[in-house]
């Protein structure tokens, strides 16, 4: 009789606590000192250690990466009616804060060389919209955007640059951490990211004054006074001391997580790269990706939906590449500059299981399932 036992789930990217128990050491300290509220030594330590890790002068620990983008836009002076350039191939959390500030997003297409914002299309967008307040750059799936070209264009037009490095902590562009080229950088520690605090984010910058201001806004803009006084609009965006303890422990294993993500990518590329119509996410000589999610495109007889369904039948999680923002019901009323690269990547792209807890047996199960589609 055939077994009906459900096979163990293989996740796309799930939380992975350290084997050494680093996180619990910091969390226990927070409990032992009864310092579990927002602010505390773990928050201060996480800000300091993250800033040192990526090479930024200052950091503010916040409740999410989305909150970090929101405060970055506010710090950059973005307000009502201002135009902000944003990659179209990204998660909605990149674009939503533009709306929070009552600003106007204009979505920029990708290029095939990086899967990220196309410098050529960015130039075209500036020609169409010379008055731009800020540019948000995303490092998709841990692949670095072409920062030299993008920064050159943005400096020429004198606009603030915000790097959404939510997916690229541990990625280097020409030996320097992504998130540290622009005026502001943001990181996410959501449950699916390369390191996690269950939920949380970080805003980094070399402008220490602006980071101090962001902390003030994130703490309900409470003025220095005996009573509760507020002279500016504030937000409840600060990270808790317990959550920050998770982050301090996770930061200790970041290099291990990057190494495992690279191993996963190379495994898939070696095993699947020779299949007809398969092309993996691009690599460039100046890019040292963290390969947060191993992704590929399909142009042959096997389509993404075939792989999604085959993997799901084996209790294996996979996902399409992000659906571009200009195709989303909420954002489709805003302008888009490009020639369809992002749409093509969405239609043909697939994100493979990239969980850092996977074993070689798990990976072999994934590739065996996928290879089987070419034998039908």
Image (cartoon, rainbow, N blue to C red):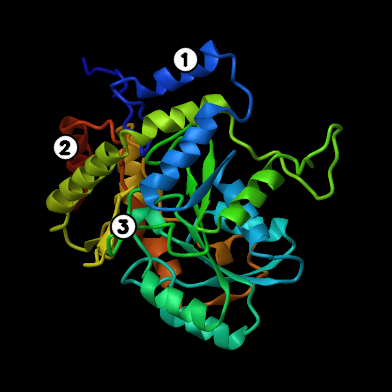
Residue drawn at (63%, 77%) of the image: 132
Label 3 vs 2, first from the N-terminus: 3
Q: Nearer the viewer, residue 181 or 65?
A: 181
Residue 172, numbered label:
3
Q: Is residue 134 left or right of residue 108?
A: right
Q: CA distance from mark 3 to mark 2?
A: 29 Å
Q: Residues within 10 Å of mark 3 (few under 14, many from 20)?
A: many
Q: Please name which of the two marks, 3 or 2, marks the residue nearer to the observer.
A: 3
Q: Secondary structure at mark 2?
A: helix
- Report how many numbered discs are placed on residues in the image: 3
Q: Secondary structure at mark 3?
A: strand
Q: Please name which of the two marks, 1 or 3, marks the residue nearer to the observer.
A: 1
Q: Residue tagged by mark 1?
A: 28
Q: CA distance from mark 1 to mark 3?
A: 33 Å
Label 2 vs 1, first from the N-terminus: 1
Residue drawn at (76%, 45%) of the image: 234
Label 1 vs 3, first from the N-terminus: 1
Q: Nearer the viewer, residue 183 or 274?
A: 183
Quadrant housing residue 357: top left
Where in the figure is residue 44, as x and y percent of width and height?
53, 35
Q: Residue tagged by mark 2?
A: 364
């Amino acid at each position: 009789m055939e077994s009906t036992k459900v096979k163990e789930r293989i996740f796309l990217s799930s939380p992975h606590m350290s084997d050494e128990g680093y996180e619990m050491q910091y969390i226990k300290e927070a409990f032992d000192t009864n310092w579990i509220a927002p602010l505390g030594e773990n928050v201060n330590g996480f800000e300091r250690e993250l800033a040192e890790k990526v090479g930024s002068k200052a950091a503010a620990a916040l409740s999410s990466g989305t909150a970090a983008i929101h405060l970055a836009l506010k710090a950059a002076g973005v307000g009502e009616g201002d135009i902000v350039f944003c990659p179209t191939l990204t998660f909605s959390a990149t674009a939503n804060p533009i709306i929070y500030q009552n600003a106007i997003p204009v979505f920029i297409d990708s290029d095939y060389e990086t899967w990220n914002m196309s410098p050529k299309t960015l130039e075209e967008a500036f020609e169409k919209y010379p008055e731009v307040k800020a540019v948000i750059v995303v490092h998709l799936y841990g692949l670095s955007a072409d920062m030299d070209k993008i920064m050159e264009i943005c400096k020429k037009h004198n606009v603030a640059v915000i790097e959404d490095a939510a997916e690229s902590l541990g990625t280097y562009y020409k030996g320097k951490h992504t998130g540290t080229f622009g005026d502001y950088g943001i990181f996410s520690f959501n449950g699916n990211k390369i390191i996690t605090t269950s939920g949380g984010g970080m805003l980094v910058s070399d402008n220490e004054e602006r980071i101090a201001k962001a902390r003030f806004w994130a703490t309900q803009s409470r003025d220095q006074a005996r009573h509760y006084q507020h002279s500016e609009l504030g937000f409840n965006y600060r990270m808790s001391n317990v959550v920050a303890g998770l982050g301090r422990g996770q930061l200790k294993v970041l290099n291990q997580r990057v190494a495992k993500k690279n191993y996963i990518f190379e495994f898939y590329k070696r095993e699947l790269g020779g299949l007809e119509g398969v092309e993996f996410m691009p690599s460039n000589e100046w890019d040292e990706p963290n390969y947060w999610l191993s992704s590929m495109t399909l142009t042959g007889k096997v389509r993404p939906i075939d792989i999604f369904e085959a993997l799901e039948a084996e209790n294996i999680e996979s996902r399409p590449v992000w659906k571009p923002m200009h195709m989303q019901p909420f954002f489709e009323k805003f302008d888009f500059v490009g020639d369809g690269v992002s749409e093509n990547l969405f239609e043909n792209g697939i994100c493979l299981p990239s969980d850092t807890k996977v074993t070689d047996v798990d990976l072999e199960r994934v590739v065996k399932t996928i290879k089987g589609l070419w034998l039908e």
